[in-house]
Amino acid sequence: MDNKVYLVKCPDYEHVNEKLAELMALMGGVSQFARAGEKIVLKVNLLQSATPEKAVTTHPAVVVAVGRMARQVGAVPIIADSPGAGLPYNQKTLERIYHTTGMVEAAETAGVEVNLDTTYQAVSFPQGNLIKRFEVISPVLTADGVFSLCKLKTHTFMSMTGAIKNNFGVIPGLTKPGYHANLQDKLHFAKMLLDLAAYVSPRLSIMDAVIGMEGNGPHTGTPRQIGWLLAATNPLALDVVAGEIIGLDRAQNPVLLAAEQQGLYPHRLEQVELIGADISDVRVPNFKLPSTVFDEAGLGPLTWLAPMLKKASSLQPHIIKDRCVACGSCYQACPVDAITMNGYAHINDKACIRCYCCHEMCPEEAVELRSSWLYRLVNRT
């Protein structure tokens, strides 16, 4: 696949229209990726019901700009996603999240539709290295092509969520926990994501890195000014550059490690051709990575102990009782039934697999990640 990544500086969302036009001009125009009459899914990141300024979801200004450009070449764009693990993929959920995230207004402004079809199908993918069958939402199956409009954020389980991880949204919500339950190892989960990205095969991946998220993302982190728009035809190349932007060492990036193991390219910066900027122009100083990134890094030559020490040397999700409203989001998201509800949520630490889905999906930020004495020892500075 193409190893080119295109970058354009974009200081704020007021300039997205003109800056995205510059970005597409570098790539030869949107007509390279969509033709008249084609149905194009704008696959946004709509993790959960969060307003745009929280930097949890793809910003509506990016969606408006891409939707307009697709319409200008005669394509028929439709906004679609299945929100995060534990959320039912139904019309009520979609309507609530579309409204809160600004997608309804974006659709009206751009003259495009939002998807309300909540059906999905099991599809065969014999080419997959690890996974050869996926459940995929219908709008993706019936589309002529997919534009992946991802967000640059940190992620407590996968270190970073970008172009490859964005494809996980084509899996219907309540089906997602099953993937976490069956693929508890980060590298195995990353290999599944690579297979899924190969199946979806987005024609174009555009990354909203105007304002990203640092810290314990993808939901409870902190918005961070980055100031760039990125695009590529190869989502893996886009993630290589995104990792460099936030200072994520490739040794702590499961997607890149899995790609290298499977012989997929590019998985290193030197294999990527940057167009529009040098990497030194876009690196963000002192970007806060997730506290989970360093779970095993401090073991040094004792990394062979990591499987035995996984729980003791990793962060433990803990319920903050005063914040918990017993909404059940964490209960629905947990892939191994480690959470029970009795006035507030309770986490069974022995059953917990440290996937952090509960932390990711709690709308009240009532799940915090606590460190053990061994975690502090392993990650001492």
Image (cartoon, grey):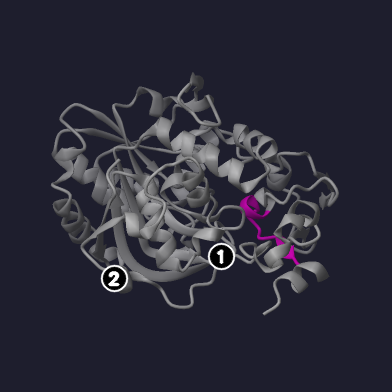
The CA span between labels 1 and 2 is: 21 Å
Q: Is residue 381 depicted above or below 72 in this figure?
A: below
Query: Which of the 4 quarters of the picture holds residue 228?
Result: bottom left
Q: How crowded is the residue under tag 2: few (<14 C-alpha within 10 Å), some, or many (20+)? A: some
Looking at the rendered structure, the secondary structure element under dot 2 is loop
Instruction: Name the one closer to the observer, 33 or 101.
Output: 33
Q: Which residues are magenta?
A: 359-371
The residue under the point 71% across, 42% down is: 334
What type is the residue that disc 1 sits on?
Answer: Gly
Residue indicated by mark 2: 11
- Position of residue 345 measured from the top left corner of the image (x, y, whole percent): 80, 51
Looking at the rendered structure, the secondary structure element under dot 1 is loop
- Position of residue 230 measured from the top left corner of the image (x, y, whole percent): 30, 57
The residue under the point 45% across, 70% down is: 224
Q: Answer whether residue 370 is magenta in the image.
A: yes
Quadrant in which the C terminus appears: bottom right
The residue under the point 81% across, 60% down is: 312
Q: What's the mark number on residue 221?
A: 1
